[in-house]
Image: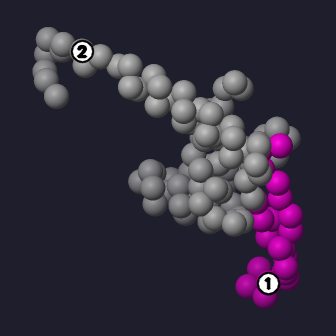
């Protein structure tokens, strides 16, 4: 199993929720779910890294008038990306199921 950062996991899961999306849409969904902001450069660094690993693929969309004719880069999770995030989720579930509720001295659940 290749270790992934939590940001990679989150972005992969966001991509798996949609057919394809661009960086701004990923940032909006991230902020909506986690209630914290993220910079577009941070997202693009992670997307490029995942694209090199084969977990994400990208293409240019059609030019739009609101962007002055510039095209957006659209991202899509690949089958390898799906299995990468699925594997880490399965490992986390196994670990979580084996956690014993600790006896805290300074508080309770």
**Which residue is located at x 86 percent, y 64 percent?**
59
Nearer to the camera, 78 or 9: 78
In the rendered picture of this protein, how many numbered marks are placed on residues?
2
Confirm whether residue 48 shows in the render.
no
In magenta stretch: residue 69 = yes
Give the residue at x 25% y 19%: 101
Query: Which quadrant, please, contains the C terminus?
Result: top left
The residue pinned by badge 1 equals 64
Q: Mark 2 or mark 1: which is in front?
A: 2
| 34 up-or-down from 20: above or below | above
3 vs 70: above or below:
above
Residue 34's spot in the image, x, y percent?
Answer: 44, 51
Q: Which residue is mark 2?
A: 102
Q: Mark 2, residues whose alpha carbon is within 10 Å: few (<14), some, or many (≥20)?
A: few
Figure check: 80 above or below 21: above
Question: Tell me, what colour scheme is on the image?
Answer: one colour
x then y, percent, for residue 104:
18, 14
Quadrant in which the N terminus appears? top right
Query: Going by the image, does 69 lie left or right of 43?
Result: right
Q: Tell me residue 54's x, y (percent).
A: 83, 43
Pick the residue in front: 90 or 36. 90
Of pointers 2 and 1, the one earlier in the residue sequence: 1
Mark 1 element type: loop
Residue 12 bears which disc, if any? none
Q: Which residues are magenta?
A: 54-75
Q: CA distance from mark 2 to mark 1?
A: 56 Å
Tell me whether the residue at label 2 lies in contact with that at label 1, contact meaning CB atoms closer than 8 angstroms. no
Question: In percent of the image, x 73 and y 85: which residue is there?
Answer: 66
Where does residue 56 sit, x and y in percent of width and height?
78, 50
Q: Secondary structure at mark 2?
A: loop
Kindly tell me whether residue 37 is visible in this rendering. yes
Q: Is residue 23 left or right of residue 69?
A: left
């Amino acid at each position: 199993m290749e270790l992934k950062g939590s940001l990679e996991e989150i972005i992969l899961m966001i991509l798996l929720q949609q057919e394809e999306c661009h960086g701004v849409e990923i940032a909006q969904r991230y902020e909506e779910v986690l209630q914290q902001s993220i910079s577009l450069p941070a997202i693009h660094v992670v997307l490029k890294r995942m694209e090199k690993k084969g977990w994400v693929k990208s293409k240019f969309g059609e030019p739009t008038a609101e962007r002055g004719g510039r095209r957006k880069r659209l991202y899509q999770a690949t089958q390898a990306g799906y299995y990468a995030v699925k594997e880490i989720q399965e490992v986390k579930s196994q670990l979580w199921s084996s956690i014993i509720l600790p006896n805290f001295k300074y508080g309770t659940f």
